[in-house]
């Protein structure tokens, strides 16, 4: 049996795809909320089984959690290049089992099927990485919550037809380290998603999750904006203003509730308002989830909630596809993402996961080369950020694994969602993003992506997220 390591070595040279250049953009407003802000997204209350609760999280908004506060995830069935995996909606069973897979499936090239997976002596079954949320033997369905049988006869909860799990990466209430719904050029593959209750928003509107917050759009995807010129409960956008900004109209039957208010622009013409601010779309917006309207002085994208600021020394710079987060010297910050090609689609982007995938991409298995190509972003051992998403961890750069403080050769580095972040050795100027899309499938399957804050030119083939392809 041939190991995956040999296949990775053969593929390394051909797999590195670097994105093409695009136009830099002018800076826009602040991306984050104050640490003192209390804005939280409201949700529709619904019946829940005993032990299930809703908790508020910084990045994902309200999520379902078990009785210990651990975030609940699902694993929807999806198609890869050569096959499907995940859980089928209303399928009645969970495909996350006690089986330890040893070979690649061939479902997602460039890995053919039948190659031995790395670190088999440490590989764990899916149900250990993703413990099923179990129900009592006499449990009954409640609302959208139903039951599936595991192969050992135990009852497992399902929500909206999908079996649900927790993640062994989550340690405390509010952790959402097993997966994200945020649009961020996410990893390809059949990933796990945190499960949200239904957002309490008017039917004309929707929520789009970003790394920086939960943006409000129309149900067709047009970004929604607010104006500094408006007063609470009053729109001051009239006359020439209406040539560039269109009020988000509410139906005649609409009524105020919670954060959502109604402004009567003229008899019989109603406009939605959020937390007292009138809502508009930008007439010139040509793309969904755009941030271009926020470049107009006094106008801002509307969010139900925003993430807290990253480390204070970080900076924001114009780049070829929008704007990126950078270190104190302006070097763009990169996130590594990876999913393996086993039947249970384990993530390989975390220090606890096999490092062979990353080492193959960044340095042909040579850690010294990796440290030059994508060096870790150093952090002071006592550094802190307002945001819980940013932490400091100790890493052994030779192995890519966590290390003990004081261990010879270890370094303290910044991590986002408990994954180390990097800069790119060939970036020369603030805003350079030469390392973006570095790896297999433009960095989406196994590789590096720049930490984008906005990506207004997403129709560029290398700037689109995996869920938009």
Image (tube, grey):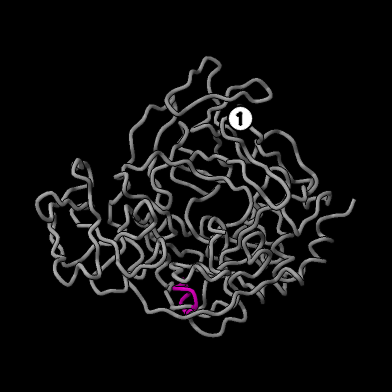
Residue 230 in the image: above or below residue 134? below
Q: Tell whether position 435 is magenta.
A: no
Crowd tier of the residue under label 1, counting other residues whose Cα lies within 10 Å: few below 14, some 14–19, many 20 or above? few
At x 12%, y 52%, the residue is 264
The image quarter containing residue 445 is: bottom right
Asked if residue 21 lies left or right of residue 299, the reply is right
Q: Nearer the viewer, residue 163 or 314?
A: 163
At x 28%, y 51%, the residue is 38
Count the numbered circles shown: 1
The image quarter containing residue 48 is: top left
Q: Quadrant of the C terminus?
A: bottom right
Q: Nearer the viewer, residue 7 or 135?
A: 7
The image quarter containing residue 212 is: bottom left
Residue 399: give x, y in percent of width and height.
Answer: 71, 62
Furthest toward the top, the residue is: 138
Find numbered disc 1 in the image and state the secondary structure of the residue it sits on: loop
Residue 105: give x, y in percent of width and height.
Answer: 77, 47
Furthest toward the left, the residue is: 267
Write down the region rendered in magenta.
Answer: 320-330
Residue 329 in the image: above or below residue 324? below
Q: Nearer the viewer, residue 390 or 406?
A: 390
Q: Nearer the viewer, residue 443 or 368?
A: 443
* Residue to which mark 1 is pinned: 91
Furthest toward the bottom, the residue is: 428
At x 67%, y 47%, the residue is 345
Furthest toward the right, the residue is: 1
């Amino acid at each position: 049996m041939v190991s995956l390591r040999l296949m990775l070595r053969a593929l390394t040279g051909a797999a590195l795809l670097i994105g093409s250049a695009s136009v830099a953009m002018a800076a826009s407003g602040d991306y984050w909320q104050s640490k003192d802000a209390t804005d939280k997204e409201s949700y529709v209350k619904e019946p829940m089984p005993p032990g299930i609760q809703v908790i508020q999280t910084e990045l994902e908004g309200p999520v379902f959690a078990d009785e210990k506060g651990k975030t609940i995830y699902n694993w929807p069935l999806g198609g890869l290049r050569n096959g499907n995996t995940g859980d089928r909606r209303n399928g009645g069973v969970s495909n996350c089992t006690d089986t330890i897979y040893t070979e690649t499936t061939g479902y997602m090239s460039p890995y053919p099927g039948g190659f031995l997976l790395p670190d088999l002596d440490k590989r764990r079954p899916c149900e250990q990485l993703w413990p099923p949320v179990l129900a009592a033997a006499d449990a009954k369905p409640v609302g959208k919550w139903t039951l599936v049988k595991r192969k050992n006869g135990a009852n497992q909860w399902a929500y909206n037809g999908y079996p649900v799990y927790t993640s062994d990466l989550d340690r405390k209430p509010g952790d959402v380290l097993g997966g994200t719904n945020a649009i961020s050029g996410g990893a390809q593959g059949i990933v796990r998603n945190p499960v949200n209750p239904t957002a309490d928003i008017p039917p004309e509107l929707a929520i789009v999750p970003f790394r920086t917050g939960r943006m409000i759009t129309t149900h067709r995807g047009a970004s929604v904006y607010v104006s500094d010129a408006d007063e609470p409960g009053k729109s001051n956008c009239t006359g020439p203003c209406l040539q560039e900004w269109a009020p988000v109209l509410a139906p005649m039957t609409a009524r105020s509730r919670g954060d959502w208010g109604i402004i009567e622009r003229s008899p019989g013409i109603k406009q939605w308002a959020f937390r007292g601010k009138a809502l508009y779309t930008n007439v010139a917006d040509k793309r969904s989830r755009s941030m271009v309207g926020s470049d107009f002085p006094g106008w801002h994208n509307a969010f139900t909630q925003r993430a807290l600021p990253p480390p204070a020394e970080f900076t924001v710079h114009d780049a070829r596809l929008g704007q990126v987060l950078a270190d104190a010297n302006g070097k763009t910050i990169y996130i590594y993402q990876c999913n393996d090609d086993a039947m249970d689609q384990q993530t390989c982007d975390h220090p606890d996961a096999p490092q062979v995938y990353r080492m193959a991409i960044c340095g042909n298995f040579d850690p010294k080369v990796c440290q030059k190509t994508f060096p870790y972003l150093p952090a002071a051992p006592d550094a802190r950020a307002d945001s819980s998403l940013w932490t400091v961890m100790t890493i052994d750069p030779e192995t890519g694994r966590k290390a003990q403080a004081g261990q010879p050769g270890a370094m303290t580095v910044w991590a986002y969602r408990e994954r180390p972040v990097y800069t790119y050795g060939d970036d020369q100027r603030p805003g350079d993003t030469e390392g973006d899309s570095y790896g297999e499938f433009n960095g989406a399957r196994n590789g590096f992506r720049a930490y984008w804050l906005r990506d207004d030119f997403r129709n560029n083939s290398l700037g689109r997220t995996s869920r938009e392809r």
